[in-house]
Image: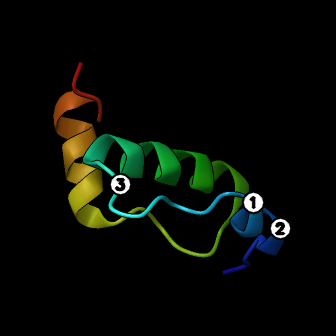
Amino acid sequence: MKINKEWHRTHKMQTKPSVEERIAWHLEHSKNCDCHKMPPQLEIILRNNNGLNS
């Protein structure tokens, strides 16, 4: 797996992000870096309710 160091440097996850913020970060991450997959528990939430609660 290859890491995009520049993307990670400029896109740090917040301290104590909400589930929605974590999902949004991981979705953007998957478009820009290949260092790891979205955590399984977030994938389940995303599948069950499209990841965002309004």
Q: Distance between the residues labelled 1 and 2?
A: 6 Å
Asked if the residue at tag 3 contacts the one at tag 2, i.e. Cβ–Cβ closer than 8 Å, the answer is no
| Dot 3 crowding, Cα within 10 Å, few <14, some 14–19, many 20+ | few
Q: Which sits earlier in the primary sequence, circle 2 or circle 3?
A: 2
Q: Distance between the residues labelled 3 and 1?
A: 17 Å
Identify the image quadrant of the N terminus.
Answer: bottom right
Disc 3 element: loop
Toward the right, the furthest residue is 6
**In the image, residue 49 lies at what x, y percent?**
19, 30
Proximity of marks 1 and 2: CB atoms separated by less than 8 Å: yes
Q: Quadrant of the C terminus?
A: top left
Residue at 27% across / 64% down in the picture?
Answer: 40
Quarter assignment of residue 53: top left
Which residue is label 2 attached to?
Answer: 6
Q: What element carries label 1?
A: helix
Q: Which amino acid does label 3 sit on?
A: Pro
- State the image coordinates of residue 52 (x, y, percent, origin top left): 29, 29
Amino acid type at mark 2: Glu
Asked if 32 appears above or below 5 in the picture, the reply is above
Say which label, 3 or 1, has the lower sequence index: 1
Place residue 7 in its image quadrant: bottom right
Residue occupying the far left of the picture: 48
Q: Where is residue 32 in the image (x, y as percent from the top left)?
A: 71, 54
Q: Where is residue 28 in the image (x, y as percent from the top left)?
A: 59, 46
**Which of the two residues, 9 or 44, is positioned nearer the viewer here?**
9
Report which residue position mark 1 lands on: 10
Residue 17 marker? 3
Q: Residues within 10 Å of mark 1 (few under 14, many from 20)?
A: few
Element at badge 2?
helix
Disc 2 and disc 3: Cα gap in Å? 21 Å
Identity, as a three-letter code, of the amino acid under mark 1: Thr
